Image (cartoon, helix red, strand yellow):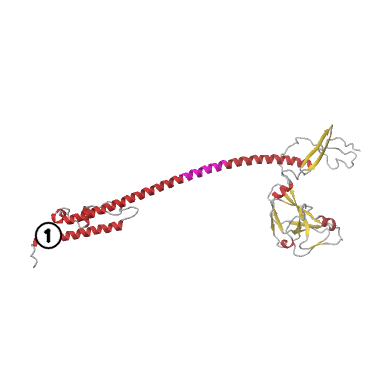
């Protein structure tokens, strides 16, 4: 059976209906593509131009090429109108779900940020508390050090006075008795038991020694030869044997080392070796060499032959131990310049020979003649 011919007006209406449906489907497809393309997990549909992802029928009509909304109200567009509304509802539901998820995520991020800020605030408070505690501790330690310094200064004054009484040795008085004007006391060296004992001082002192002549590693580094030796031997760091003629000018010989003491209470003295000075006449041209604590260059030995003219010269060979270095405590007093002394001493202005030579008229420390038989 052949198709019945359609009314031309009906054909035009059907064509318009199909065109509108096609355009609406294209508009909905564009919106769906834009939603997929513009969705951001952090910002949701904020990049979508239709009011942060809010989808409406008007938006579909606009994206379909500007279809009049009254056109969808025609009865023959009921199916298309229902499809558009279903699409809009589905898109809005999707946007709302994403928006809710985004809001939840932002709320969680905000909570994490608040927790981080609170944790940082606690750490900052703890750091400030620790800083205040550290400052208080430093101030307390400074006070304790200041008190210790004052006690040390007082002890140093006592030690200086005791050294003056003992001729340089720290002493204590034992069994002292006073009868009339005579005083008998025994001076006993207390250096082994005192807190400032020499052994403790020796162990606490560390001086830097710079080896300037590598041959000292072969000859032997400077050291004390015995446990109770007073000084260290110094080597003649010369390139070839040196002849010292009797009474000739002294010759400076390098010791091959430098010593930095860096302490105001210590100095080093360079002295002749006892055997060489007594037996062979090898002494120092300057008598005694003094090395200051802040001197940091090579130490020289002023070698001089004291033997009378006409005797055999002395031969010094490389590596000979020709002198010794001894370390001494130094007192650096503060000077008070006066016109007259504040007290009088027993000796006063008595000079050479004022104490006599004979023991017949020996005077004891209290000023009375010593009447020992």
The quadrant in which the C terminus is found is: top right
Magenta residues, start to end: 121-136
Give the image location of residue 130, x and y in percent.
Answer: 53, 43
Give the image location of residue 141, x and y in percent.
Answer: 60, 42
As drawn, which residue projects farthest toward the front? Answer: 1
Of 320 and 64, nearer the camera is 64
Image: 137 above or below 243: above
Secondary element at tag 1: helix
* Residue in the image at 24% along x and 59% along y: 29
As drawn, which residue projects farthest toward the top? Answer: 180
Magenta stretch prevailing secondary structure: helix
Left or right, 370 with respect to 160, comes to: right
As drawn, which residue projects farthest toward the right? Answer: 373
Give the image location of residue 12, x and y in percent.
Answer: 11, 61
Give the image location of residue 103, x and y in percent.
Answer: 33, 49
The quadrant in which the N terminus is found is: bottom left
* Membership of 123 in magenta stretch: yes
* Membership of 33 in magenta stretch: no
Please give the residue where the numbered disc 1 appears in the rendered image.
13
Mark 1 crowdedness (10 Å alpha carbons): few <14, some 14-19, many ≥20: few
How many badges with numbers are in the image? 1
Left or right, 208 with respect to 165, comes to: left
Of 365 and 140, nearer the camera is 140
Answer yes or no: is residue 61 visible: no
Answer yes or no: is residue 11 visible: yes
Of 76 and 224, nearer the camera is 76
As drawn, which residue projects farthest toward the bottom? Answer: 1
* Residue in the image at 53% along x and 41% along y: 132
Residue 38, by quadrant, is bottom left
């Amino acid at each position: 059976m052949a198709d019945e011919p359609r009314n031309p007006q009906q054909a035009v209406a059907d064509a318009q209906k199909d065109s509108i449906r096609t355009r609406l489907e294209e508009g909905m497809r564009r919106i769906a593509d834009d939603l997929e393309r513009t969705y951001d997990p952090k910002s949701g549909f904020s990049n979508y131009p239709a009011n942060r992802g809010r989808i409406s029928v008007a938006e579909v009509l606009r994206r379909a090429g500007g279809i009049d909304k009254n056109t969808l109200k025609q009865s023959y567009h009921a199916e298309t109108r229902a499809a558009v509304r279903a699409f809009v509802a589905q898109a809005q539901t999707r946007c709302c779900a994403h928006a809710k998820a985004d809001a939840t995520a932002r709320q969680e991020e905000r909570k994490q940020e608040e927790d981080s800020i609170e944790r940082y605030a606690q750490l900052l408070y703890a750091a400030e508390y620790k800083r205040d505690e550290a400052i208080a501790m430093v101030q307390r330690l400074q006070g304790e050090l200041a008190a210790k310094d004052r006690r040390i200064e007082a002890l140093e004054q006592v030690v200086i006075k005791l050294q003056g009484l003992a001729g340089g040795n720290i002493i204590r008085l034992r069994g002292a008795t006073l009868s009339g004007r005579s005083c008998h006391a025994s001076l006993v060296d207390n250096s082994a038991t005192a807190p400032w004992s020499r052994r403790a001082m020796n162990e606490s002192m560390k001086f830097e020694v710079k080896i300037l002549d590598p041959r000292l590693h072969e000859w032997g580094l400077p050291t004390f030869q015995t446990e109770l030796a007073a000084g260290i031997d110094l080597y003649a760091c010369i390139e070839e044997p040196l002849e010292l003629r009797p009474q000739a000018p002294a010759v400076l010989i390098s010791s091959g080392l430098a010593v930095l003491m860096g302490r105001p209470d210590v100095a080093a003295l360079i002295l002749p070796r006892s055997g060489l000075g007594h037996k062979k006449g090898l002494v120092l041209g300057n008598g005694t060499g003094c090395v200051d604590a802040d001197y940091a260059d090579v130490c020289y030995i002023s070698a001089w032959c004291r033997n009378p003219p006409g005797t055999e010269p002395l031969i010094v060979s490389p590596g000979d131990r020709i002198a010794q270095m001894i370390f001494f405590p130094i007192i650096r007093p503060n000077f008070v310049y006066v016109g007259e002394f504040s007290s009088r001493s027993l000796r006063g202005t008595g000079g050479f020979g004022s104490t006599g030579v004979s023991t017949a008229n020996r005077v004891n420390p209290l000023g009375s003649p010593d009447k020992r038989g």
